[in-house]
Image (spheres, rainbow, N blue to C red):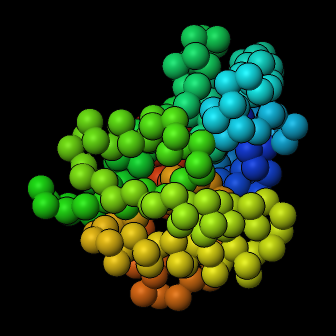
Amino acid sequence: MRPTPRKLGVLGGMGPLATADFLQKLVVWTPASFDQEHIPTIVYSIPQVPDRTRAILDHNGASPVPAMVEGLSCLERCGVEAITIPCNTAHYWFDELQGKTSVPLLHIVDATLVELGKHGLDADSKVGLLGTVGTLAGGHVQAALEAAGHVLVLPGQSLLEERVMGAITAVKAGRLAEARVHAQASVTALQSAGADVVVLACTELPIALADAVPEVKSGWVDTVEALARYCVSWATDDRS
């Protein structure tokens, strides 16, 4: 029998379906033969956290930080040993959130960089980036990827607002067929612009692309799956 994994906290609800997708991938990637070998997980999923993109774009709007800190405090009281947040846009406040809890936070971009490292990219390779308007305006994901030496291909404003946000909004509303059309067009556009791999830096996008055509599916990094695998490595110390 494998050692019991460490207890993981999940600050979710941003959005609810993305949290469910993360939890499913966490279970799938855990090297377990029966229930007792899976990761003890405490989930705090309160969808009423104020909109992250709106808060980044309008600094006078409602901040999501107090609601997220409330969730972190709840998870800390539950005795979790690390906390993860399956929402790329929320990581705009990562340092501030880490300062509000003694529990280490596992960063989704760190997980993404691990997955990118498996793609065999060379110095001339280009990485496409899709995310919310807030994520791209915040610049936190771009900064981390560029600091790691990646050359980025970003969506134009029209593609971002109409297609990428169209896909994300449709997932949140449960219109998955509509979301797939927008998301496939977004990935294809960045591939046509020279991206060798596309980072799906919004946790709704992998849901939109779950039934994508094979040629679109072959060249992206799913940040939800990356985060799930990263959390499994942390929880099990790679004891598979």
Going 76% across and 39% down the picture, which residue do you hit?
51
Residue drawn at 19 percent across, 62 percent down: 125
In the rendered image of this protein, does residue 18 appear above or below residue 179?
above
Residue 217: image x %, image y %?
47, 79
Residue situated in front as seen by the camera: 51 or 66: 51
- Residue 81, above or below 52: above
Nearer to me, 154 or 222: 154
Count of residue discs = 0
Residue 83 in view in this figure? yes
**Viewed as shown, does residue 227 lie left or right of 10?**
left
The residue lying at 80 percent from left, 73 percent from top is: 175
Q: Nearer the viewer, residue 51 or 236?
A: 51
| Horizontal side of residue 90 vs 46, given as left or right | left
* Extreme residue toward the front, this view: 158
* Rendering coords of residue 107 (x, y %): 49, 35
Is 237 left, or right, of 203 in this rendering?
Answer: left
**Residue lying farthest left?**
123
Instruction: Answer with the quarter of the image where residue 104 lies.
Output: top right
Q: Is residue 58 left or right of residue 50?
A: left
Residue 238 visible in the shown view: no
Above/below status of 222 relative to 211: above
Q: Position of residue 20 (x, y in %)?
A: 74, 56
Question: Image quarter for residue 72?
Answer: top right
Q: Nearer the viewer, residue 186 or 19?
A: 186
For the point 53% across and 88% down, the residue is 213
